Image (tube, rainbow, N blue to C red):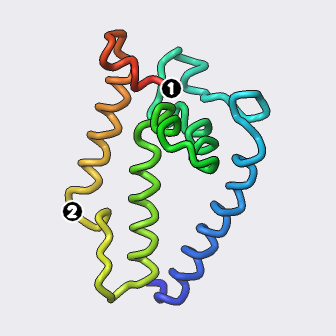
């Protein structure tokens, strides 16, 4: 079992890598090429859970929260959940508890992903707003 010291190093290295990618999404718009297209969409013509995430991240780093949610409704809550989990992991033993540590969390997340993926591909009007 790795010590807390090593866990913090891995968490900080991962957070640093993610922060290093953000300028790429700030200066380059994924909508105008240069970024890989979703392989699931290219093969099936259906939107996966992650479709629209690159455009959503581009809008998010520019401060356009509403259009970010329009590209991918789950990106912002997922980022908030990951940041909360990383903070809880960094401060182990203190009062911050990760919501991902709950026993039911993996099942709930899986169901949210599955339902979101199905709904965003339905052709009816209320669900078409979920498509990127």
Q: Secondary structure at mark 2?
A: loop
The front one of 89 and 73 is 73
Q: Farthest residue toward the left?
A: 104
Label 1 CA crowd tier, 10 Å (few <14, some 14–19, many 20+): some
Mark 2 or mark 1, earlier in chain: 2
Q: x and y percent of residue 100 in the render?
A: 32, 63
Instruction: Name which residue lies at 60% across and 67% down.
Output: 14
Instruction: Check disc 1 and report the residue beneath it.
Output: 132
**Along the viewing direction, whichever of 24 and 105 lies nearer the viewer:** 24
Identified at 53% across, 89% down, the residue is 5
Left/right of residue 62 with respect to residue 6 in the rendered view: right
Residue that appears at 39% across and 59% down: 81
Q: CA distance from mark 2 to mark 1?
A: 31 Å
Compared to residue 38, the image places residue 99 above or below, namely below
Q: Which residue is mark 2?
A: 103
Under tag 1, what secondary structure? loop
The image quarter in which residue 130 lies: top left
Q: Quarter of the image containing the N terminus?
A: bottom left
Label at residue 107: none
Whole-percent x, y for residue 76 in the image: 45, 48
Q: Is residue 52 above or below residue 80?
A: above
Q: Position of residue 12 (x, y in %)?
A: 59, 76
Q: Is 102 positioned to the left or the right of 124 in the image?
A: left
Quadrant of residue 39 within the rendered picture: top right
Rendering coords of residue 36 (x, y %): 70, 33
């Amino acid at each position: 079992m790795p010590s807390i010291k090593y866990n913090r190093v891995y968490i900080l290295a991962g957070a640093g890598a993610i922060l290093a990618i953000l300028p790429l999404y700030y200066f380059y718009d994924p909508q105008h090429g240069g970024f890989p297209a979703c392989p699931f969409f290219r093969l099936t013509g259906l939107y996966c859970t992650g479709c629209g995430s690159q455009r959503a991240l581009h809008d998010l780093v520019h401060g356009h929260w509403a259009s970010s949610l329009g590209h991918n409704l789950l990106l912002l809550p997922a980022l908030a959940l990951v940041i909360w989990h990383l903070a809880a992991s960094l401060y182990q033993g203190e009062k911050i508890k990760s919501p991902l540590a709950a026993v039911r969390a993996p099942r709930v997340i899986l169901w949210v992903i599955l339902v979101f993926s199905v709904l965003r591909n339905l052709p009816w009007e209320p669900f078409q707003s979920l498509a990127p």
